[in-house]
Amino acid sequence: MTQRTFKTLKVLLDVADIPIIYLGLLASYYLRFFSGWFDVSKGVPPIGAYERTFFGIACLWYLLFWLEGVYAMRGRFTLDQFFRVLKTVFMASVLLLAAVFFFRSFAYSRLTVVLGLLVTTGVLGLFHVAKRRLLFHLHHRGLGVRRAVILGAGEPVRTCFERIARNPELGIQVVGALTETPEVPDGCTRLGDPSAIRQVLMEKDVEEVFVAWPEYSARRVMDLIQSADMAGVTFRVIPDVYGLIASSVQLGEMAGLPVINIGLLPIHGFQGTLKHAFDFLASLLGLIVLSPFLAIVAILIRLESRGDVIYSQERVGLDGKPFTIFKFRSMRSDAEVQTGPVWAAKDDPRRTRVGAFIRKFSIDELPQLYNVLRGDMSLVGPRPERPHFVHKFSREVPDYMRRHHVRTGITGWAQINGLRGECPIDERTRSDIWYIENWSLVLDFEILLKTIWVCIFRPEGN
């Protein structure tokens, strides 16, 4: 299958949304009037008006998906993409209801419209998941894969290469990197320095270039892009995000003089109080709703092995102050007698059978809702570490202690992006700082929903 054939197949799969939406809406008509589930004492309206309206809505729905970039999304169907699709469905629903309300020449059944939205959303969602699986299967067999090179230096090159390598469903094959230094990630081929970009693009039949340059010069990047002068090549600039984002820069004024405030965190004042209030109410509700489940987990732990059901441990929290964290015990009672403080490893032999299961799905973290209720922690924030590791990392990792300017959390931005367990601590720290500097209540909601998604569908607990 050539690249052109693959693109044609993808376009056809995207356009297939129109008949699927149309048939889903049409199915709601038959469900409403011929299923026998609903009252039809007022008679069955002619289907012709519904057919014309449904076809128009299907075309409009497809157009909204296209405008919102739904068809440009790559990779597995993530929560980010789900929200984008949900946003588009909501817009289409509003337009559909508006059309039904203002179109006075024909009285549409409101129940049919509601059924149509529910049926179509479900069917369309299943089709999009199936479509992603088909494309992933083709990519896995090397079909429709776009060849790419990474242009840059240092840590961003490694991060970019590893992220692409870990996500084959993106359909991208990195043929090598153009770097200023000889160091490249394991498994990646160095193709020369950046000045050789034009030659490499011609010889390697490259379609995409990822520019991953720390502290890059925009002028320099543009010069390289212009020198390449290759039609059909897409340049994707991946900036050193954590270096570009200033430390909570805010514009303000003082006595009429414009000033730039640096160092004010978003989680302060009223917003900090709002976050704390949300944590309190959500943790209280969570403990009440989950109490039967928590009791069952506790019984299973106690039946399998002797020892305390709840495992307590000292961690470092807000402003570097220690507190006691609570977790379900997932290891033997004597797990650290011989080793002392060590990080849990993947497939850790010290785990119990129940412990392995609850760690895989992060169920062992649920007792920390009590920590949130007490005010020791937040639902979302940097993960708390033990004093031994905090002392070690504070000397080795720049800006590490900035993580303690806010309450630590049960989950966080780093965790939902795969930065947990034995990942590099400096990378996790940069992610934590990004969260602190860009916090919003909406971001907390997003992280909580993604955490639930990851724990259920992509569990990676140790």
Image (cartoon, helix red, strand yellow):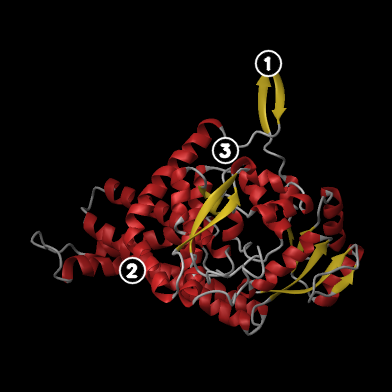
Which residue corresponds to the image point at 52% horizontal and 64% vertical from the top-left? 78
Q: Which label's residue is closer to the chain start, 3 or 2? A: 2
Q: Is residue 64 left or right of residue 44?
A: right
Secondary structure under badge 1?
A: loop
Around disc 1, counting alpha carbons within 10 Å, would you say few (fewer than 14), some (14 to 19), or many (20 or more)? Answer: few
Q: Is residue 52 visible?
A: no
Q: Quadrant of residue 93?
A: bottom left
Q: Is residue 271 visible?
A: yes
Residue 201 on image: x %, y %: 83, 71
Around disc 3, counting alpha carbons within 10 Å, would you say few (fewer than 14), some (14 to 19), or many (20 or more)? Answer: many
Type of amino acid under label 2: Gly
Q: Which residue is mark 2?
A: 24
Looking at the image, which is closer to me, 434 or 113?
A: 434
Secondary structure under badge 3?
A: loop
Q: Which label's residue is closer to the chain start, 3 or 1? A: 1
Q: Which residue is mark 3?
A: 267
